Each structure stands twice: as structure tokens, then as C-alpha cells.
Amino acid sequence: MYTRARAGDLVRHSGISVPFRTLSVRPPTLCDVTSPPPGAAAPQLNTADGAARPAPGPAADEGLARRLRALACTAPLHDLDARKANLAGEYGVYAMAEVALAAIDLVTLHMDFDTGADHEQIVARLLPRVAAQAPGRPAPEHDRVARWVLENLINVGSVDRGFRAVYGTFGPDGVYVRRDYDFKLIEEVPGPGGSVYLRTTDEAVNVLVGALDTDVTSAQIAAEVKLEVLISRGRLADAQLAAEQARYRTVQYSETLRRTLDATRRNVRAVDWLSTVPELISEALDHVADRYRHENAILTNIRKARDEAESAEHKRRAAELVDIVKDCIRRHTQLQSRLLEAGPLFRAEQDRQAFAPPAPRSGYDLYGQLLAPVLPLPVERAGRVTDAFFARGTGLRTPTSVRMADLVEMLLTPPVEREHLGAEMPEPDLIATPDDSRFSEEQLAVAMELLELPADAPRRLSGLLADARRRDPDLPYLIALLAVHAASPPVGTAYRQGEQRLLFAVDDGTELDDHEFGGADLIVGTALLDAAGMAADRAEVA
Amino acid sequence: MTEYDIDEMTPPDAAPAPAAPGMTPADAADAARLVAFGLQPKLLPARDVEYAELLRRHRDEPAFARLTDAVAAGLGLIVLEVSTRAGMAVTAAEDSVFAVRMGDYARRAATDSADRFLHGLAHLAVAALAFPRPEDLADDGYIGRVTVNGVDAFVRQACHRLEERAEEQGENTDPTTGAPGLESAWRVYARRSATGATKDARRLAGSTTGIVGKAAAFLVDSGFLQRTGDESGGTYRTTARYQLQVRDMAASAAMAELLELGVVPVSDGGATLLPPDESDDLDLVADAGLPFHS
């Protein structure tokens, strides 16, 4: 469970047992990490049992190789501290490895379902920590340190934007082989609109955030149970750690699903839509529903803990926990909406691809016959195939040939000045739309004035109509319309908007005697509303 | 469909004189003109009256067709198809002045074998995703659609699958130091970053999306793809010429090379990206994504 502590141990042990001074401190383009020099390790083995003992087999070496690789993942962090001395300026006060680990944590937490973490946002969130390490230094320097660390974690400058470590193993034939291990800690991924986002790689999550290569679901359940127990016992410090772990798992779970859905989207035929994918999706939906219920329960518990807590420290921790769990819930909701989109998308693709009439002849299966067999080949041999495809598959280019006369003329022609503001905009031809309102604004104003009745003196509709008729022969229609509307007054709207008065109309059975209108002679009046009381009510409900 | 098929369909009496001697220098100029149209791959016959007229002549007059083919062959061009659909679809023969060379295509590719491979692979992957099934490549009416990010994700997924397979078998795929040529091809792709931030907001040229994007842009200039939008790093649809080029030239050349390497991909003519058999006891690991069956 305490994967964080474990990752810490790893770093600590490595600091002791492996001489990290052998890290070659080179320009930040490529971080070379050398494992313990084989020349030093091998004699030790030999001196223990003498030369008679055969070299350890591949089975024994496999675990060693795995640990060496895990160790290599931590090396770029140590390397940062080793290299900070080479920076122009006095950067000794900054704990670069700490900033780097914090950056990896931040990126992991800000990775979204669709994209990743925003570069600038990560820098901004790193700044408080950097500033705390050297409060006396100017802010631009803090910014520079944060950026330096992040860029080195991405390893900007190398083509692969990754790290390479060299380690040695004994092959099946007992021959010592040195191998290259390539890995990345933070990688840049394309986001929507051509932007670039950051994601932590599996290596970084596994080694540096916590050993998460366990069964995601079961680990999550364990974390939830633990969290509930911790909260109920009031051990909030531990509960926060557990909640953070739970969130890492949530992130990883959605990451897994994102990849699966992406793959589904890419190629319909490659996915078993009959059983495997629906199972996967329903499993994930169950998971979301389950977690959502759990986390809401936890949320209620912590809220209670937060409100009842007496010490300020407890209150603060509980408040932080609320934020974390809220974030978990947000992620689950996001995941769920993605899951619901998968089905319709698949069906659309299915319609497009599967129900097309069969082609009269057969072509090449480019994936199965070319791409798939090429990828496992050594790059030297694979290159021959891709070269052949490139040579025949790119089409033709007409070679450009230049005449001396043209060249001279071209070079002597002054560059065309570009219009700074671009082409002139044509004046838009506007046509006024005819006003087709039944009543004019003035008529409405007059009608509203007529209906401005004192609260204690309602009037009959017949009287209002007679008044209106005297002013304007068209006005009674508007009055009648407003009065009929007032028969069902918009009470809810008036309540929400905090109106002070409301026009209403009541039918007391009297019939309207009018040569233009028929129906009931409504009593039209104004009701006064308790605006202040309603406002208080609303605040209470909210 | 080749020009010879069209010849056979033409009624014999429609041709004025079957022999080339009847052709005049003016006809030769017209034939060369048609080839010149073919050398502008983005030009559509439907948009140019003269082009369409010359294509009609090529269809109706076997002697003119033969003359045109001779002009093309003399220039080092291979005629793939002559039709109103694809126009005068010609492509460069090997060693022709019109052929595209890897060194001119990408500077790094000339020296770095990994880059050279990645650029070639990008073209292969664009084609594989544009024509995912054998039927798609064979069907003249099919129009493929690809996106730059889609191609990258597709290859990455295939690489990921291979990585998992190697892990399942307990294989150590880390290459021997100092022998970069022996590294598995998928690893070269997998470890290259997908994208990267640059100072001027352009795509990082060395990243895989940069390489795929370059391939797509190049194919647009070849008249093989048409850009339809900017989503997912750029969306494109295929043209008739691209289908001809891949089907008649590129796929067979690459296949021949593969066979020479001793790799024999077996196919029954169906697609390999298929759902698994009922009997196949496949546990879809959450992270596995596409269960490829190849």
C-alpha cells in the first residue's frame, strides 16, 4: 500500500549501494547512466566461489535486470542534483530531485482523460515549492529552476526525448552482454488543436509515483476500504495519504481505458465487439458506479469530520481530503461519459465498413502482410522493406532546373510589399427587417400604465377596457391579452427574480359585457410580494 | 485497370489507322503534352478541358496511346492508368530523374539508419491505415481517410502489442550496446517521442507525428492525398492515384524485399485485423488495447 514509501526506499538504497558518481555529468541532451561497472562486479562473484563456478544464468539475471532498469529510472533525478553545479549561477540551495519528483507527481495528477497536463500549469504549480527552497532569490530564478527541471525530465534536446541507461546481463550462453535500456519519464503528447501536453510514462508511474503494476481494481478497493477505516478512526494524516494513492489508481485506470477506447475507435474489425469489449465497458461502468457510491459516502464522512474537528490541523487535512475525493468523483464522471460514447461510435464505424459490398478482386493486406511482419525485424533488415516501399510509394517529383537569366531576374526583383492590413473589407449591405409587432412600444407603455393599479384597489376588466378604448381603439386588445395572462400569474418567476409586485386576474363569475370581447369580466389587481422574505428563503434553500 | 484494358474495349473500327507511322510531329507534341499533364499530379482532368480532350484521344486512338506510352517510357516513367478518374497516372521508374530519393526527402535520413527507417515506415503506415483491408485496396471506388495522429497511434499500438508479447515470453528486448542495427524495429518507433514542444509552435520534425505529418504533406504534393481538415494533426483522404501507386508499385516492391529477407507472410486474401475465434482463449488485459490477430 505504501508505495510511496517504497519508492522512497528505492531512492535511498540506491544512493547507498550504487555509486551514482559514475553518472556521467554531460550536457543535458542525453543522460547516460552506467550500472555498476561490470569489471568491478564480476571479480567479486568470482572471488566468492572461485573461477570454477559458471556464470549466473539468465533466470538469475532477469530479476537483476529488472531492478537495474528500475534503478535507472531514478538516475535522471539524481543527475539533476549532480548537474546543478554546472549551471551558470549559484543553484546549490535548490533540491532538484525533490522538485523533479514533485513535477512527476503533478503531471500524474493533472493528466486528463483526453489530454495530459499543461506545461505552463505544471511550472506554475511547481513555483511555490521552488520558492520555498530559496525564499531570498528573485522570482525569475525560481521560474528558471522549475523550467530547467521540467525540461530535463522531458530531456529536451535529444531526438528521442528520452533517457538511455546501459546495463549488462549474462545471456543464455553465459556471454556477458551490455544492453541499452531506453526510457522516458515525462513524454509530450499531441492534444486537440495541435497543442502539446505532458503525460508521465508507465516507467515514471511505476517507479517514482509508486509500484502500481498491481491489479488496478483490487488495489483500488483495498485503498477505499482502508480510507474509510482511517477516516472513521479520525486518523486524517494517514487517510490523506491513502486518498492520494486512490487517486493515482483512478488516474491509471482511466488511462488504461483511454488506450483501449482509442484502439476501438481506430479499427473496428480488430476488436471483438461480440463479447470482449462490451464486457470491458460494462465492467468499467460497474466500476464507475461502485466508486461513485463509495466516494460519495467517504465525502459525507469527511465533511462531518471537517465540521466536527476541533484542531485547525485536522480541519485543514479534512478540507484537503474533500478536495481530493471531489477530484476523484470528477474523474469518474468523465470516464463514464467516455464509456457511453463508445457504443454509438462503434456502430457508425460498423455501418461504414462492414456493410460495404465485397470487392471483385483481392489486394494486398498492407497491415498483415507488410506492416506487422516488418515491425519485429531488426531495424537494419526492416529498413530495406520500408526503403522499397518508400522508393515506389512516394510518387514523382519534377526536378527543378533554373535558367541563369531567370535567376538573375529573380534575385534582382525587389520583394513585393505585403499589405499590412490585408484586403479591404467590402461594406456590408444591410437591410432593415420590417417591424411586424402587433403592438408598438408606446402602446405597451400606455397599457402598463393603465394596469399600474394600487394594491388595495383592484378593477374590473370592463372598466379597464373602456379606459383603454378612450385612448386608442387598438389598445383594448392588448389590455385583454395582458389580463388573460394575469389569470395565471408567473409566480415562480417572480419568486426567483425577487419581484416586489405581481399582476393577477380572478374570475368571480361575472360575465363580460362588451361588443368586442366575450368571457368573464375578470377582476384585475396587483399583489404585493414580500421580496425580502423571499430572498431569505432562497438563500436558505441554496 | 491499365491502358491496355481500355485498348481492348475500344471497337477496332473506331481507330483510324492502327499503325504509328500515321502520326505527325503535332501528334507527338500532343502525346508529350499529355505526359506533361501527368507530371502535374494535383491537376484534375475534370478541371482542364485540354487535359480531358487528350485523355479522350488516348482512349479512342490506339496509335496515339502507343505514342504517349512511348514518350512516357522514354522519360523514365511508368504508366499506371489512363482514365478520366485518375488522369494520366504516371510514376517514376527506378533511377529516373523523377524518382524521389530518401536523402533529398529528409536530410537526417541520409546518415541515420533509424531515421531512414522511421520515414519509410511512416509511408507504409499511412498506406496501411488508408487501405486497412485488402478489399479497400482493390476496390476502385474506395476512398480512405487518415489522420496524422491516428497513424501514429495505430503504429504505437502495434508496437505496444509486440512489446507485451516480448514481455510475456520473458524476452529481453533491450538491444546490445554498440549494435543499433540489431534493435527491433518496433522499439525504434516506440522510444521516439510522439510529439514535442518547439519554440515556434510547429511540429517537432524528429517526433513520430512530425515524421508522419511530413509523409502526409509530401503525399499531398504527389497528388496522392487531399487535406480535408486540421483535426487530429491533419486529416486527409486518398485519391485514385494513391490507390494505384500503392497497389501496383509500392506494395509489391516491399513484399518482394520482405520475401528476399526470408519472411513469408501468409495470407488467404482476407484481412488480418480480425476478431478472434470463439475457441481462442484470449483474456483481454485492460491495457492491451487492440487484440491483433496476425
Image (cartoon, grey):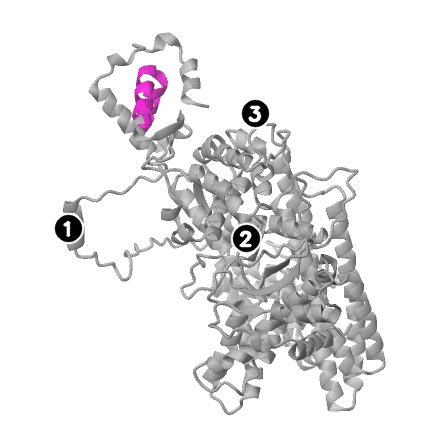
Residues rendered magenta in the picture: B48-73
- Amino acid type shown at disc 2: Tyr
Q: Position of residue B117 (x, y in %)?
A: 49, 48
- Amino acid type shown at disc 3: Arg
Residue B29: in magenta span: no
Neighbours of disc 1 within 10 Å: few (<14), some (14-19), many (20+): few
Q: Quadrant of residue A423?
A: bottom left
User: Disc 3 marks which residue?
Assistant: A361
Relative depth, front residue between A176 and A242: A176
Q: Quadrant of residue A374?
A: top right
What secondary structure is found at the residue carrying circle 3? Answer: loop
Residue under the point 64% across and 46% down? A345
Horizontally, residue B235 falls left or right of residue A463, namely left
User: Disc 1 marks which residue?
Assistant: A408
Compared with A537, A485 (above or below) is: above
User: Disc 2 marks which residue?
Assistant: B189
In the rendered structure, the residue with mark 3 lies on which chain?
A: A
Distance, label 3 to label 2, CA atoms, is 33 Å
Distance, label 2 to label 1, CA atoms, is 45 Å
Distance, label 1 to label 3, CA atoms, is 55 Å
Compared with A465, A80 (above or below) is: below
